[in-house]
Image (cartoon, grey):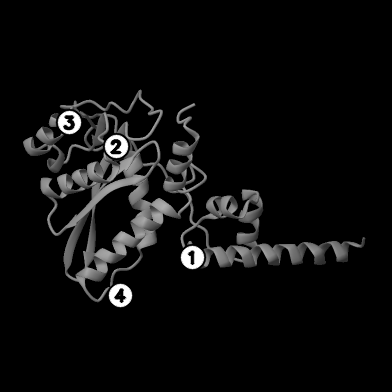
Amino acid sequence: MSRFDYVCRQEIKDLEIKKRILELREFHKNYGYRRLAIALNLNKKRVRRICKKYQIQIHRKASKPFKVSSQELNKYPNLLKNLSPLTENIIWATDFTYLKYKDKFFYLATFIDIYTRKIVGFSISDKHDTDLILKAFYDAIHKENSSPAIIHSDQGTEYCSDKYFQALSKLNIKISMSAKASPWQNGFQESFYRGFKEDLGSLKYCNSIGELFEKVFQTIHYYNNLRIHLALKMSPIQFSNLISKSGTAGS
């Protein structure tokens, strides 16, 4: 085979993979080369090469935040430092983020199972208070028909209220908290919100608050059911179903 024939065949193969990548990105608009490689069952270096060759934009992995050296002692310690759950509904993490819509702010609170990476409960409100957190908490309890052994959060005022402490205490849930000014200690939620906002996209095309809420619901559904999680190599729901069927969670 001549070098010319080899180059032509390689170009044909590359173009075919480019086509598959672009088709996949039509639905998964924010997939980087790692998720593309998993979905297409291809080597990630090959996918990255083809994305670069045809100038297909890929998202770079976010850099790790700078860690401050001096931290205040927690009222509640970070229990996640030396713990790793062996199945679902053992440790949940929680946080909230803001969503700007026109001249108004809305707030989304979520609870994530750190074993399956599934968003087990969420709530939206125009106020960031303890009620926002508790609505998401009870949503998770209802959907999972279970409560975790530990819930981890930062030290925001919403998570330091007596109302929040009492709700967890009634279910014998241990409280875990990140040190102040240490967002990386709640990395599961930080990572989720980073990807969530990319997938949610601009809210300026929503014609009403109802459409805004519907878009949030759809994006969480997409994350739970369809979006490949790099740590799992599949979506959180697929992973949860897999461990449920196998009966060998944590083995």
Tell me the distance, in whole angstroms, between the alpha carbons under discs 2 and 3: 14 Å
Asked which secondary structure carries label 4, the reply is loop
Tell me, for residue 92, which label it has, or none: 2
Of the residues shown, which amino acid type is indicated by label 2? Answer: Trp
Tell me the distance, in whole angstroms, between the alpha carbons under discs 3 and 4: 42 Å
Quadrant position of residue 4: bottom right
Mark 1 lies on residue:
27
Label 3 environment density (alpha carbons within 10 Å; few <14, some 14–19, many ≥20): few
Q: Nearer the viewer, residue 209 or 89?
A: 89
Q: Is residue 6 left or right of residue 158?
A: right
If the image is split into quadrants, where does the N terminus sit?
bottom right
Chain-order first, disc 3 or disc 1? 1
Residue drawn at 39 percent across, 51 percent down: 224
Q: Are marks 3 and 1 in contact (CB under 8 Å)?
A: no
Question: Please, is residue 116 above or below residue 210 in the view?
Answer: above
Chain-order first, disc 4 or disc 2? 2
Q: Residue furthest top?
A: 82
Tell me the distance, in whole angstroms, between the alpha carbons under discs 3 and 1: 40 Å
Q: Are marks 4 and 2 in contact (CB under 8 Å)?
A: no
Chain-order first, disc 2 or disc 1? 1
Tell me the distance, in whole angstroms, between the alpha carbons under discs 1 and 4: 19 Å
Label 4 environment density (alpha carbons within 10 Å; few <14, some 14–19, many ≥20): few
Residue drawn at 52 percent across, 64 percent down: 25
Tell me the distance, in whole angstroms, between the alpha carbons under discs 4 and 2: 33 Å
Of the residues shown, which amino acid type is indicated by label 3? Answer: Leu
Q: What percent of the width, then of the height, locates residue 55?
A: 59, 65
Mark 4 lies on residue:
205
Label 2 environment density (alpha carbons within 10 Å; few <14, some 14–19, many ≥20): many
Tell me, for residue 171, which label it has, or none: 3
Q: Nearer the viewer, residue 141 or 181?
A: 141
Is any atom of residue 178 visible in this view?
no
Q: Nearer the viewer, mark 3 or mark 1?
A: 3
